[in-house]
Image (spheres, rainbow, N blue to C red):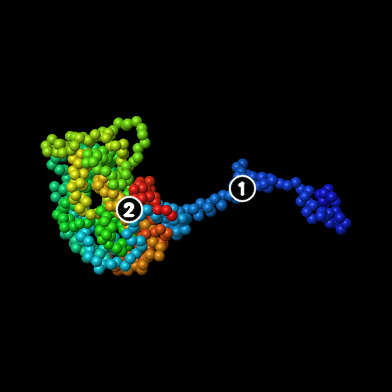
Amino acid sequence: MDLLRQLGGLLPGGKPPQLPLGQGEKDKPRRTLAQRLQYLRRPLRLRGNSSISVPLGVVLLFPCIVVILILVLFVRHPSSPGRILMPAGAPPNIRKISEKYDKVFVTGCLEPDTSKPRANGAFVVLARNKELDGVIQSIKSIERHFNRWYHYPYVFLNDGDFDDTFKDTVKNYTSAPVEFGKVGPDMWGFPDWVDPKVAKEGIAKQGDAAVMYGGMESYHSMCRFYSGFFYKHELLQKYEWYWRLEPEIKYFCDITYDPFLKMIENNKTYGFTIAVKELRETVPNIFRYASAYKRLNNITSQGLWEMFVEPQPEKKPEAPEPGLPEEILRSDPGANKLPEIDPEAMEGEKYNMCHFWSNFEIARLDFFRSKAYEDFFQMMDHSGGFWMERWGDAPIHSLAAGALLGPKDIHYFRDFGYRHTTIQHCPANAPARQLPREPYLEKTTLDEKKRIEEDKYWDDYDTPKENGVGCRCRCDTDIVDVEGKDGSCLAEWVDVAGGWASP
């Protein structure tokens, strides 16, 4: 009451004086935006007796930031249905690629057409008896997702003898023809022009330096075999195409067409599904010899070589990597088979470590049997790099393809979901192109309940997404797809394949 009297007193009847409408607002000074928001600076104590305080505005804004972050993570998560709401092409694994040289053979699912004659091709598996469990995993996967319809034969190779348990078990997991062969000493181990003592010392040094698989003599032999001998094996002489299978691999999508026939129809030579970078310490000198082969044979790039080359800015010349030791070559007859290599004459090029990951590849065998590839392999082989370094067959195949083929000869099996160890590529499913799945109850699992549960797992395939190309894919979610990792070479492939397509 005292306050009201000070402001102007009371009217008769105890009512405060009334101002004409709008007059009070006119008399009040206008407050700026900063003054109106001044209350947001009001400090709030974290606890009643705490000396730490936080502005009221921060307290009000924090929940909003949390909600926004949750929404962003939801939309960006690979398994989130919110991903389908993203603009076309946002993540690289579903972004459209130019079809200038290559395109997906089939988008989504087809009814498998088994009326056409099969191609002259086979699955090739290099394995040992102790890897039986991993082989079973691989056969079950490829049979479920492809070969139950097409029945392509298998060729199993081993540097030893397959035992009866291995043979009988493998035959029990497929109705397709199966052959077993042995890799002889002419294709495995040290060639006669290599000094075994020096080679073994080189392998031991790689083991001491913790080069991945570098200390395993059998791994060096395997890489050399897949680089220059597998296609010469007697069991493969009758085939024109091969599809490589490794133990312990997984396929995630149904393949409802024949990739061999599509490769023939589209005049392709080599197909891949993952391209990644090699470990630099395994191949320090490989590009020196690959580049020399290309240069000495006056080979002009057809556009694929650039996928494996790292553009170098102009700079002062650096000291070259020390070359491979010549002691590994016996003076007779191998020493004179390798032309002199100038370590600095690589035309300013440097290997970017990219390669097609060859544990999955579908390829025309006459490419490997060609004189040009054989000359390439012989030059690489006589350098000693398969022993003194840990050259893999993946960079050998890739650099040979880079020198001898063009982007038009290569097919990216983007619609194949595939995993080996901790590296995976798995496409999104194609919208409006999925078909009902036919159950596959393989007969090897004796527990019928387990068989049914295993098959029903694949009924619940991933939600289709914009730009998806897969058929009934169900991807593993415990690891990130290779396209989301730094070691991926998808961008390098896209560059030579014509670039990203316009949205």
Q: How crowded is mark 2: few (under 14 residues within 10 Å), some or many (20 or more)?
A: some
| Along the viewing direction, whichever of 403 and 489 lies nearer the viewer | 403
Q: In terms of image quadrants, where is residue 412?
A: bottom left
| Along the viewing direction, whichever of 178 and 434 lies nearer the viewer | 434
Q: Distance between the residues labelled 1 and 2?
A: 56 Å
The earlier-in-sequence mark between 1 and 2 is: 1
Residue 116 at x, y = what percent? 24, 66
Please give the name of the residue rendered at 36% of the width and 34% of the height, measured from the top-left corner: 314
* Mark 1: secondary structure: helix
| Along the viewing direction, whichever of 415 and 447 lies nearer the viewer | 415
Q: Residues within 10 Å of mark 1 (few under 14, many from 20)?
A: some
Residue 266 at x, y = what percent? 28, 58
Please give the name of the residue rendered at 25% of the width and 64% of the height, measured from the top-left corner: 150
Q: Which amino acid does label 1 sit on?
A: Gly
> Which quadrant holds the C terminus?
bottom left
Disc number at residue 57? 1
Question: Tags 1 and 2 in contact by the CB under 8 Å rule?
Answer: no
Which residue in the rendered view is the most extreme toward the left?
332
| Residue 336 versus residue 409 in the image, above or below | above
Q: In terms of image quadrants, where is residue 279?
A: top left
Q: Which amino acid does label 2 sit on?
A: Tyr
**Circle nearer the viewer, 1 or 2:** 2
* Mark 2: secondary structure: loop
> Can residue 500 be seen in the rendering of this structure?
yes
